[in-house]
Image: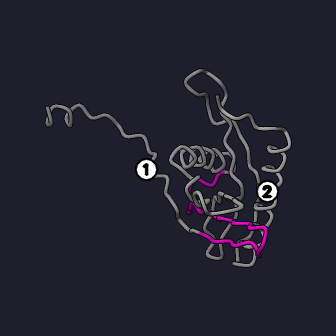
Amino acid sequence: MPDSISITQISQRTRLGDEGERLAAIYLSGRGYNLIISNFTVPVGRNSKGVQVTGEIDIVALDAEGVLCFVEVKTRTSEAFAGPLSAVDLRKQRQITRTSKIYKRVFGLWRTASRFDVVTVVMRPDSEPKLELIRGFWNADKFRKRRWEPDIYHQNF
């Protein structure tokens, strides 16, 4: 039987995540990023059960070169089990990619160069927070829908 999570644990996780995002925003500003918005949230579609799915981007910013950056922030209190970067899996990347497309469509930014960055924050109780920026952690091309071409099918089968 799985362990249940208490309201207190959820509240602590939320506070940890909020603090990590605040530190990440300061960190990015210090590296020449111009912050545009945080916690951009929109509906991105429905799942296989027909339930509305919401996408969120932690931070949207312009870097010093004017590239539109969609930044995912992952905060942990330890790297003992797995580092924060391991939580940015394909499902999370796909969700952020879908959300970024909506962002660009809503604001008419289709032709603007963009990138997906990740800021990891490790907040150990006995030391200063450790932040790391991973620029271009993934790109949207890997989630592009491919067109089915009957000729390719016939050439291979």
How much space separates mark 1 and mark 2, taking CA atoms? 31 Å
Magenta residues, as a range?
108-133
Q: Amino acid at mark 2?
A: Leu
Name above or below for residue 68 compared with residue 45.
below
User: Tag 1: residue type?
Assistant: Lys
Give the residue at the far front of this rendering: 1
> To which residue does mark 1 refer?
142
Image: 151 above or below 39? above
Which residue is pictured at 80% across the width and 49% down the height? 14
Q: Which residue is mark 2?
A: 16
| Mark 1 residue element | helix
The quadrant of the rendering that contains the C terminus is top left
Q: Quadrant of residue 63?
A: bottom right
Q: Quadrant of the N terminus?
A: top right
Residue drawn 58% across the image and 28% down it: 47
**Residue 87 among those drawn in magenta:** no
